[in-house]
Image (spheres, helix red, strand yellow):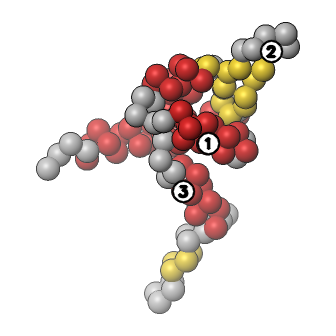
Amino acid sequence: MDQVKVKQDDFTLCPKFTETFAMLGKKWNGLIIEVLLHEHTQRFKDLAAHVDKCSDRVLCERLKELEEDGIFSRNTYPGESRVDYSLTERGRDLAPVMEAVHEWSNQWCGKD
């Protein structure tokens, strides 16, 4: 199993762990994933309304990146101009991770 390897004098981060945090840690990605976990399929305007402080340009960039990472799929409909987004199995598997973040933030955020 690829995990953090710890020795007395040596510490290295697993490349898979680093890759995951690069994706999840990018501003707005966690919020986009959270919206899709709870609201399932969303159109761009609906995602933009939920993540209201994110500009449309940045939201487009993040959606493109998350699609490339296989976190969600962009769904088009023949004969319609309709496009929506929904999580893939890979994206839905982030649900326990997001729940753990909720639990941690409920315990530790907002407390000074």
Residue at image location 45% in from the left, 30% down from the top: 51
- Indicate the position of residue 61 as horizontal and vertical percent values: 61, 42
**Viewer-side residue, 70 vs 48:** 48
Residue at image location 53% in from the left, 33% down from the top: 56
Task: Determine whether 33 is above or below 109 in the image.
Answer: above
Label 3 with label 1: CB-CB less than 8 Å: no
- Mark 1 — residue? 61
**Viewer-side residue, 6 vs 109:** 109
The quarter holding residue 63 reads: top right
Q: Nearer the viewer, mark 1 or mark 2?
A: 1
Residue type, mark 3 in image: Phe
- Indicate the position of residue 86 as horizontal and vertical percent values: 66, 26
Residue at image location 80% in from the left, 15% down from the top: 77
Which badge, 3 or 2, is on the more N-terminal residue?
3
- Mark 3 — residue? 21
Task: Determine whether 109 is above or below 51 in the image.
Answer: below
Q: Secondary structure at mark 2?
A: loop
